[in-house]
């Protein structure tokens, strides 16, 4: 699990055959550790002094924009949450739901307004003032539209993440709030359990 508070901006040193090599200043990384790379939970299979190597599956390739990274691309990095860690963002699993495209970037005083276009499977889980992870960054949805959502990025977040390098039409990884998925499952389960027999047994008819 992760929080969406980015710890380092890493640099892709190589990416090939479903494997990525990322240079990082993060310390205490060990083989087998989980690391979120642009919001995608990966496992370090090799750890060197200033970089780590991780594999990613064909399914990850299909759902995310990971394989579109190139040598020297900058990526958001976060180590997995520890039980003693302070949760300052929101709970993120590192299991990306899909992609979104940046439609607009606008600077308003010191803040940045960004509008994203996304598929219905993502927008269905978006709520105003709800949490969302964009390339692994914990953000809050300020408003919604039929085709996407809007966020405002504070200067600290903008300057400490790859948000500062984004351009219109760039695609990003999106993970919606996991709580929304649990609520949907619970509601669907209860709805599916309602039957004529159940209503009779409980005195409704």
Image (tube, rainbow, N blue to C red):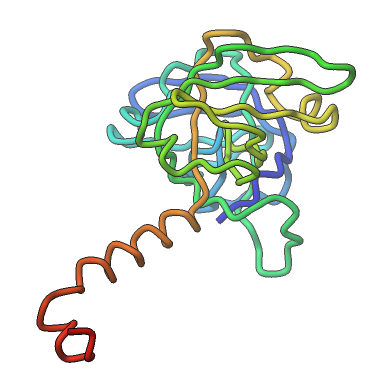
Q: Position of residue 198 (x, y in %)?
A: 16, 83
- The structure residue drawn at horizontal position 20% and vertical position 73%, both measured from the top left corner, is 193
User: Which of 10/203 is in front?
Assistant: 203
Give the tally of numbered discs: 0
Q: Position of residue 38 (x, y in %)?
A: 56, 32
Q: Position of residue 203 (x, y in %)?
A: 22, 91
Furthest residue toward top: 168
Give the answer, above or below, for where 183 lies relative to 94. below
The part of the image, by quadrant, that contains residue 63 is: top left
Furthest residue toward front: 205
Give the answer, above or below, for where 142 lies relative to 131. above
The part of the image, by quadrant, that contains residue 57 is: top left
- The structure residue drawn at horizontal position 89% and vertical position 17%, both measured from the top left corner, is 109
Give the answer, above or below, for where 57 lies relative to 172. below
- The structure residue drawn at horizontal position 64% and vertical position 31%, both measured from the top left corner, is 76
Furthest residue toward right: 109
The part of the image, by quadrant, that contains residue 181 is: bottom left
Say left or right for 109 vs 178.
Answer: right
Quadrant showing the C terminus: bottom left
Q: Position of residue 152 (x, y in %)?
A: 73, 28
Give the answer, above or below, for where 110 lies relative to 54. above
Quadrant showing the N terminus: bottom right
- The structure residue drawn at horizontal position 68% and vertical position 32%, both measured from the top left corner, is 24
User: Which of 39/190 is in front?
Assistant: 190
User: Which of 111/1 is in front?
Assistant: 111
């Amino acid at each position: 699990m992760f929080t969406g508070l980015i710890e380092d901006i890493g640099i892709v040193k190589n990416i090939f055959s479903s494997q990525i090599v990322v240079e990082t200043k993060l310390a205490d990384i060990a083989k087998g550790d989980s690391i979120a790379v642009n919001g995608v939970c990966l496992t370090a299979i090799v750890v060197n002094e200033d970089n780590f190597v991780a594999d990613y599956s064909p399914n990850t390739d299909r759902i995310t924009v990971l394989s579109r990274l190139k040598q020297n691309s900058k990526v958001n990095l976060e180590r997995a949450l520890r039980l003693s860690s302070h949760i300052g963002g929101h709970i993120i699993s590192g299991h990306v739901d899909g992609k979104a495209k940046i439609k607009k970037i606008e600077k308003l005083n010191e803040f940045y307004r960004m509008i994203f276009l996304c598929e219905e499977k993502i927008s269905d889980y978006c709520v105003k003032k709800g949490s969302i992870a964009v390339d692994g960054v914990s953000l809050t949805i300020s408003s919604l539209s039929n085709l996407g959502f809007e966020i405002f990025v504070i200067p600290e977040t903008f300057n400490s993440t790859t948000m500062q390098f984004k351009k219109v039409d760039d695609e990003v990884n999106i993970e919606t709030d996991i709580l929304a998925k649990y609520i949907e499952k619970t509601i669907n389960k209860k709805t599916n359990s309602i039957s004529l027999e159940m209503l009779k047994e409980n005195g409704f008819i």
